[in-house]
Amino acid sequence: MKTKEELKLYFENGDKPTQENFGEWLDSYWHKSEKLGNSALDLITYQEFRYSPTDNTEITGNDSIIVFPEGIKIIGGFRFNLTLQNRVTKIQFPQSLEIIRANAFGAQYLRGTLTIPGSCKVIEAHAFNSTVADLSELVLENGIETIADGSFQLLGCKNLTDLYIPKSVKSVGQSAFYIPALKTVSAPDGLDLSNAGIPETATILRYVDL
């Protein structure tokens, strides 16, 4: 199979790509209707140093950054062993994702920004439930429809103070957003958040989709 750099050579200014060139280009990618083989499901994982919380000159171990490949539709039946070697701190989801199964990333050490793509229609129960995560931003893109019980129970996220729930969300489960640090939540008018776990001290701003 040709590399990306080799394929680009077929389509430089002034070139006249042949039928064979176009065929090689198409064969280098998966169509969304094709089932991916096991060899295509290998995770791309990066490692980053973990520093002591009291001394930024002391390295105490490694954390993992996981990039899921495009074409993946469901992530589930899947939970990392909570060893120092398998701590997950950052995740990049594909735009093809449709479902995140229950407990998929429970008890993980996520930090920084977590983005759930709008292609993901369902986030099942306790998918990101964690007392040790330290997220500062949770981005829920428009397109998400169901956020099940306890999906984002994030007791340790002291800097996660603002949350925007997109207009596409139709159902929010019990304690789905049990995030004690929340101060402001923007949500579509009519969405039931009575059991969502949002702290009573938080301000809920309702918006209308015109």
Image (cartoon, rainbow, N blue to C red):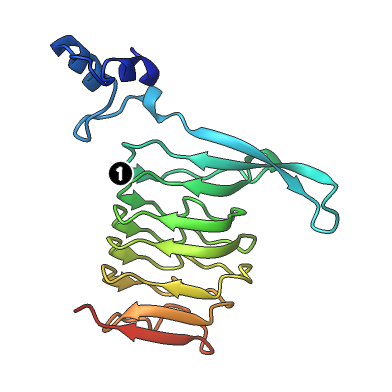
Q: Nearer the viewer, residue 69 or 107?
A: 69
Residue 205 versus residue 54 in the image, above or below? below
Residue 187 versus residue 53 in the image, above or below? below
Query: Which quarter of the figure is the N terminus placed in?
Result: top left
Residue at 40 percent across and 30 percent down: it is 41
- Residue 182 percent coordinates (x, y): 54, 78
Tell me which corner region of the image, top left, top right, bottom left or bottom right, holds residue 37: top left
In the image, what residue type sits under mark 1? Ser
Farthest front residue in view: 14
Q: How many marks?
A: 1
Residue at 52 percent across and 84 percent down: it is 199
Residue 13 versus residue 181 in the image, above or below? above
- Residue 90 percent coordinates (x, y): 55, 49
Query: Which quarter of the figure is the C terminus placed in?
Result: bottom left
Residue at 34 percent across and 13 percent down: it is 2
Q: Nearer the viewer, residue 102 or 182?
A: 182
Task: Kindly identify which residue carries mark 1.
Answer: 96
**Neighbourhood count class around disc 1 (C-alpha, 10 Å): few under 14, some 14–19, many 20 upward:** some
- Residue 152 percent coordinates (x, y): 48, 65
- Residue 188 percent coordinates (x, y): 30, 79
Q: Is residue 113 left or right of residue 24?
A: right
Numbered disc 1: secondary structure: loop
Residue at 53 percent across and 58 percent down: it is 113
Tell me which corner region of the image, top left, top right, bottom left or bottom right, holds residue 170: bottom left
Residue 191 versus residue 139 in the image, above or below? below
